[in-house]
Amino acid sequence: MPKPRTKTGQKNLIADNLIELRRRNHFSQRMLAYKLQLAGYDMDKNVITRIETNKRYVTDIELKALCEVFEISYEELIEGK
């Protein structure tokens, strides 16, 4: 069974919002990965790159981790509000 994609063929809904959140917080991909690892999540720079370029699906644990690090809600991460 194929994995779901958006109407535009993207593999996740957060790519653009994640890029914007990183820029707003002055985080490089490497710095974000470091902060995620300090919080106990096993995500490296390559994972973040693949999410941002829509080459990778995002797990629920990764959504939770990103929300924790940026101190935002799921809705803000997914919808950019």
Image: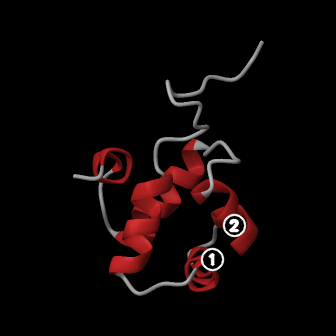
Residue sitting farthest toward the front: 8
Classify 10 Å Cα crowding around label 1: few (below 14), some (14-19), many (20 and above).
many
Tell me what residue is drawn at x 36 percent, y 82 percent: 25
Q: Quadrant of residue 59?
A: top right
Q: Position of residue 43 (x, y in %)?
A: 69, 67
Q: Amino acid at mark 1?
A: Ala
The amino acid type found where label 2 is placed reads Met
Residue at 52% x, 30% y: name it. Answer: 8
39 left or right, relative to 79: right
Against 59, is 21 above or below? below
64 left or right, relative to 46: left
Point out the image quarter for the N terminus. Answer: top right
Secondary structure under tag 1 reads: helix
Please tell me whether residue 50 is drawn above or below residue 31 in the rendered image.
above
Q: Which x, y percent locates residue 63?
A: 50, 51
Which residue is disc 2 drawn over?
43
Given the current orientation, which residue lies at the most extreme left position? 81
Question: Residue 57 occupies which quadrant of the picture?
Answer: top right
Q: In this rendered view, identify the residue nearer to me: 6 or 46.
A: 6
What residue sits 55% from the left and 84% below the top?
28
Residue 18: x and y in percent read 45, 62
Residue 33 has which mark? 1
**Which residue is painted at 64% across and 83% down in the image?**
30
User: Callout 2: 10 Å neighbours few (<14), some, many (20+)?
Assistant: some
Number of disc labels: 2
Are discs 2 and 1 less than 8 Å apart at CB? yes
Q: Which tag, 2 or 1, sits closer to the chain's start?
A: 1
How far separated are the C-alphas under marks 2 and 1?
Answer: 6 Å
Where residue 69 appears, as percent x and y from the top left, is 44, 72
